Image (cartoon, grey):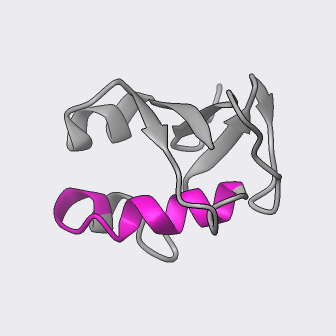
Amino acid sequence: MNVTVLYFAGLRESLGVEREALRLPDAVDTAAGLREWLRARGGAWSEAFADGRAVRVAVDQALAAPSASLHEGAEVAFFPPVTGG
C-alpha cells in the first residue's frame, strides 16, 4: 500500500523531513502499525515514536485512533499534542 506521511512541529524538526511517500509492507495496515514501522528505522525515528511519547495521528485530515485502518493513497499526519490558551 502506498501512503503519504506528513510530520509536523517538533517531529518535523527532529526527523529532518516534512513529508514522504512510502510503500508499506502488507503487515502495516493501521496507524499504530505505521508508527511502529517508522520507529523500527532506528535513531531519531526510534526516539520520536518511542512508547509513551505523545504523538497524535490524523488520517485523511481527520484525527484518528491508533487502530485506524489505512488505505491505498491515505494521507497520514503525525504531530505532537497541541495545547491552547
Q: Position of residue 19 (x, y in %)?
A: 39, 25
Q: Position of residue 76 (x, y in %)?
A: 62, 35
Quadrant in the rendering for residue 66: bottom right
Q: Is residue 14 left or right of residue 53?
A: left
Residue 1 shown in magenta: no
Q: Is residue 4 above or below residue 32?
A: above
Q: Position of residue 36 (x, y in %)?
A: 50, 69
Q: Residue furthest bottom?
A: 51
State the residue at coordinates (21%, 58%): 44
Of 11 and 24, the residue lying toward us: 24
Q: Quadrant of the C terminus?
A: top right
Q: Position of residue 61 (x, y in %)?
A: 74, 22
Quadrant in the rendering for residue 14: top left
Of 5 and 46, the residue lying toward us: 5
Quadrant in the rendering for residue 74: top right
Q: Is residue 48 above or below residue 84?
A: below
Q: Quadrant of the N terminus?
A: top right
State the residue at coordinates (68%, 27%): 73
The prevailing secondary structure element of the residues shown in magenta is: helix
Q: Is residue 38 above or below residue 46?
A: above
For the record, the magenta segment spans 31-45
Q: Is residue 8 above or below residue 10?
A: above
State the residue at coordinates (48%, 43%): 23
State the residue at coordinates (58%, 36%): 2
Of 24 and 44, the residue lying toward us: 24
